[in-house]
Amino acid sequence: MNRINKKLQEDKKLLSIYFTAGYPALNDTVQIIQDLEKNGVDMIEIGLPFSDPLADGPTIQDSSTAALKNGMHTALLFEQLKDIRKTVSIPLIIMGYFNPMLQYGVEAFCKKCHEIGIDGLIMPDLPLDVYQADYEAIFKKYGLVNVFLITPQTSDARIHQIDAASNGFIYMVSSASVTGSKSGFGDTQTDYFKRIAAMQLNTPQVVGFGIKDEETFKAATKNTNGAIIGSAFIKHLTENGVSSIADFVKKIR
């Protein structure tokens, strides 16, 4: 069984952390992953930096730009992660945009992910119908979970389509805005969380966007299986450095 599916079976609210590979420094990637696991994080999303990250807010955009300037690229990330399974056991997901994956070669990318122990991919700009028509067989060949995103604006019909196509979890974007632009949840987000819970989907849901502390983590996970923190963690790294990861995680739960 894929590590993601095993983790989702645990009787707890999962904390997933996103960070940008190659930031703050080019060679910080492995230490960040190891320290996050050591401090109780359940799942990690490793951001593959891209030059035009349209869905990301300023914090993640800036970290992506800095990582690219540091010299991060797809082949280097794979090289950094080649021995990661010797020290890390929690699920690892690569999140990025489809263009770098396409440039590397979709099957070559998936094969390399399988070899180094990546469990899943999140490619927000890879449409469901294109994935199913052209790439689903490749993802399954290499045992990779493909995570789809939904927003408060996603129709019920589309959500049911995504639910049927999913084999890991559904990434529930808490708002229609870019990452890092919310500070807490209002009635719109709360109603959205309740709406999705009432649909009784077969696929577990994990919330992202707007989670930054214990309060927002608890609110996001009241009706879901877990929550993802990205911008707040990157801000913490920027201000406090890689050595301060334990302090950040302790403030969440």
Image (cartoon, rainbow, N blue to C red):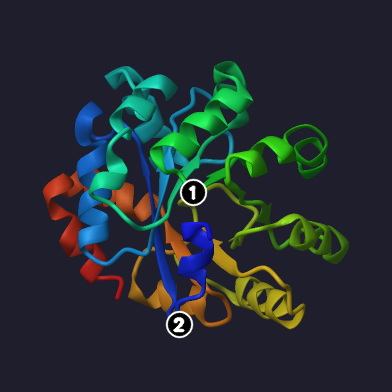
Q: Residue at x 54, y 64 (%)?
A: 5
Q: Amino acid at mark 2?
A: Asp
Q: Amino acid at mark 1?
A: Asp
Q: CA distance from mark 1 to mark 2?
A: 20 Å
| Percent coordinates x, y for residue 29 in the rendering | 27, 37
Residue 190: quarter of image: bottom right
| Percent coordinates x, y for residue 106 in the rendering | 62, 26
SS at circle 2:
loop
Q: Residue at x 68, y 79 (%)?
A: 197
SS at circle 1:
loop
Residue 140 or residue 39, whichever sits in front: 140
| Percent coordinates x, y for residue 183 in the rendering | 44, 63
In this rendering, would 158 be left or right of 228? right
Q: Residue at x 54, y 19 (%)?
A: 104
| Farthest-out residue, right | 157
In this rendering, would 60 be left or right of 201? left
